[in-house]
Image: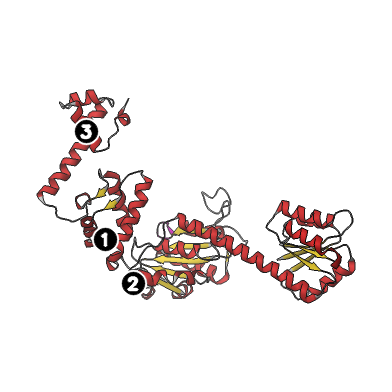
Amino acid sequence: MKVLVVDDDPNTRYLIEVFCRDEDYDLVLASDGKEAIHIFEQGGINIVVSDIRMPEVDGQAVLEAVQKINPEIPVIIMTSYGTIEEAVNFLQSGAHDYITKPLTREVFCHRVRRAVEKLHMTREILRLKTSLKVYTDRDHVIGTSRAMRSVIEKLPAIAQTDASVVVYGESGTGKELVARTIHYFSKRASKPFVPVNCGALPENLLESELFGYKRGAFTDAHTDTPGLAEEAHTGTLFLDEVGEISPKVQVKLLRFLQEKEIKPLGSTKIIRTDVRIVSATNKNLIEAIADGSFREDLYYRLNIIPIHIPPLRERKEDIPLLANHFLRKFSQEYDRKVKDISPLALQKLVGYNWPGNIRELENKIQQTVVVTNSNVITPEELDLPGETRTFKEEKRKLVSEFEQNYASKMLSLNGGNITRAAKAANMDRKNFWQLLKKYKIQAQDYSE
């Protein structure tokens, strides 16, 4: 934090310097308005304290210059008793506060501290607005079940620390979503959130992805490339499927966590980084330690705060909430007028065990929104694996698929011309057109 003080009186500048020796900000002194504006233009100044009456460039010019460059910077005016009215005019022009001369340490430092507090508050409000916008623009953690409430309620408090977190849960339970929520509720919200899937990369690629490499470090290293740990500087590094990391990379990751520094492949240079680590795994890491596939010391570095996400089959009361959330999402995304899920369809969704968890449910709702021909999703439209249909249900499904495929084929063969397609199908044109309408098939999509 830097406070710029401008006064043409050297005694006043010296007095202020003495006042501020024990304060928690750096003092920058200027002897006139011109010098103050030049210093401010270089950047890095957080608060300006300016005398009003100065030769050539006065306090009014300083205030105007600051407001032109950055109107969010607080400007405090110093004035003598004879110019209080003038100081009030400055406040109306945008100054933050004024201090009367002769100066006292108690008053001067109190007013500056108040400006510092206002600045911190403004920044915090901006950070929260930014993080809330990013967070609300994304999917968020959904659940009213007891199991999920106990998780969701902890997230804001967990987010305010920099402690390492491991999110445990089966595939598809929303572990990355929980990790993102922690990030967007944290003080790092406006900084990068960098995910890396540790299970999707072989050992050599994972190491270079995480820590970067220098040109010539290996055959395909044509340029210097920073690693994801460096890219996440001041933000959050999300290690998905952390239980799949090889023993060799585990050693390097442990050193990174201990020293907060990395050394790219092929480099002798040490790079210091400030990142928060959030990991996720569908493995039991205690069992992995027992069988020798995961380092115990790395576990204790990562597992400071464990979070366990229950599978969807253990929080079935959340299924209607999630299903309707995905319905709204995909209806909007695909511009479909699907407005609801029937009670019997919801009952069918709740009765299924969802081995793929939330990801499988999302996929099923997406698929159904795309192919349905009605405004309400019915049980017959939910084709769930392993279910047994009645003869009537199976027949309806097969007939529907046949009609859609046949109508599309006739249009394709006849260049999108409805009259020719109906004639080729030996159907009345009106009946063929109603078939297209029923399945929302656009003839122009098949025009030559």
- Mark yes or no: residue 145 visible: yes
Q: Position of residue 214 (x, y in %)?
A: 58, 54
- Label 2, residues with CA under 10 Å away: few <14, some 14-19, many ≥20: few
Q: Is residue 177 above or below residue 154?
A: above
Frontmost residue, 394 versus 257: 394
Instruction: Say whether residue 201 is magenta.
Output: yes
What type is the residue that disc 3 sits on?
A: Gln
Which residue is rendered at x = 44% and y = 72% of the image? 154
Q: Position of residue 91 (x, y in %)?
A: 74, 60
Instruction: Say whether residue 373 is magenta.
Output: no
Please tell me whether mark 3 sits on a helix, a strand or a loop. Answer: helix
Give the mark toward the camera: 1 or 2: 2
Q: Is residue 349 left or right of residue 30?
A: left
Dots 3 and 2: beta carbons under 8 Å?
A: no
- Label 1, residues with CA under 10 Å away: few <14, some 14-19, many ≥20: some
Please tell me whether mark 2 sits on a helix, a strand or a loop. Answer: helix
Q: Marks 1 and 2, Cα distance to the nearest angstrom?
A: 19 Å
Q: Marks 3 and 1, Cα distance to the nearest angstrom?
A: 37 Å
Disc number placed over residue 153 in the picture, else none: none
The quadrant where residue 114 appears: bottom right
The quadrant where residue 120 appears: bottom right
Disc number placed over residue 146 in the picture, else none: 2
| Magenta span | 198-202
Q: Which residue is mark 1?
A: 354
Q: Which residue is mark 3?
A: 434
Give the mark toward the camera: 3 or 2: 3
What type is the residue that disc 2 sits on?
A: Arg
Please tell me whether mark 1 sits on a helix, a strand or a loop. Answer: loop
Dots 1 and 2: beta carbons under 8 Å?
A: no
> Which tag, 3 or 1, sits closer to the chain's start?
1
